[in-house]
Amino acid sequence: MHLAYPVVLSALLFCTGLYGVLARRNAILVLMSVELMLNAVNLNLVAFDVWLSKAAEETLHSGQALTLFTITIAAAEIGIGLAIVLAVHRNRGTADIDKLRDTAEGRETDDPDAPDEATATADPSGRSEKAEATA
């Protein structure tokens, strides 16, 4: 088999994964796209290892060894990534990346002149509606 076949397939897989990372908004689909990209790299490593082993008398199979390391790292990445996504989904109720972008800064409104929630519900005496409900 020629080297061009697995390389072209790997390029198609990598481009599909890259499109998934850039176009998707769901965190789980982004993780799946990253896995697709890593599998494309694994296919390239094995294909070039086989191609280079035909030229050399002593084969080290370093491409296959690197593939095993890549698979191990990918498994750890997907495990930790899914754990983080599930924890965020439990807290926020969504796995949408656009809605999770403001996690570190806090929630901001689109209108900078809009009053805060605390000042909007406060009456002239300075007490909020929540304080009156608990009193």
Image (cartoon, rainbow, N blue to C red):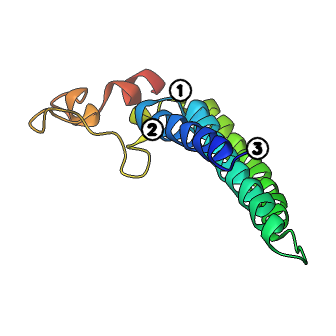
Q: Do the CB atoms of the residues marked 1 and 2 lie less than 8 Å apart?
A: yes
**Which comes sooner in the sequence, label 1 or label 2?**
1
- Helix, strand or loop at mark 3: loop
Query: Mark 2: which secondary structure?
Result: helix
User: In the rendered image, which residue does mark 1 sit on?
Assistant: 94
Check disc 3 and report the residue beneath it: 1
Q: Position of residue 56 (x, y in %)?
A: 82, 75
Q: Position of residue 3 (x, y in %)?
A: 67, 50
Residue 119 in picture, x, y percent from top left: 21, 35
Q: Amino acid at mark 2?
A: Leu
As drawn, 126 above or below 93: below
**Residue at the image position 79 percent from the left and 53 percent from the top:** 71
Q: Is residue 129 left or right of residue 122?
A: right
Give the foreground label among 2 and 3: 3
Q: CA distance from mark 3 to mark 1?
A: 46 Å
The tag on residue 100 is 2
Q: Looking at the rendering, which quadrant does residue 114 occupy?
A: top left
Amino acid at circle 3: Met
Which residue is at the front of the view, 81 or 112? 81
Q: Is residue 14 above or below residue 53?
A: above
Work out how far the residue at label 1 is from the one at label 2, CA to CA, in angstroms. 8 Å
Nearer-N-terminus badge (3/1): 3
| Image side of residue 33 versus residue 42, left or right | left
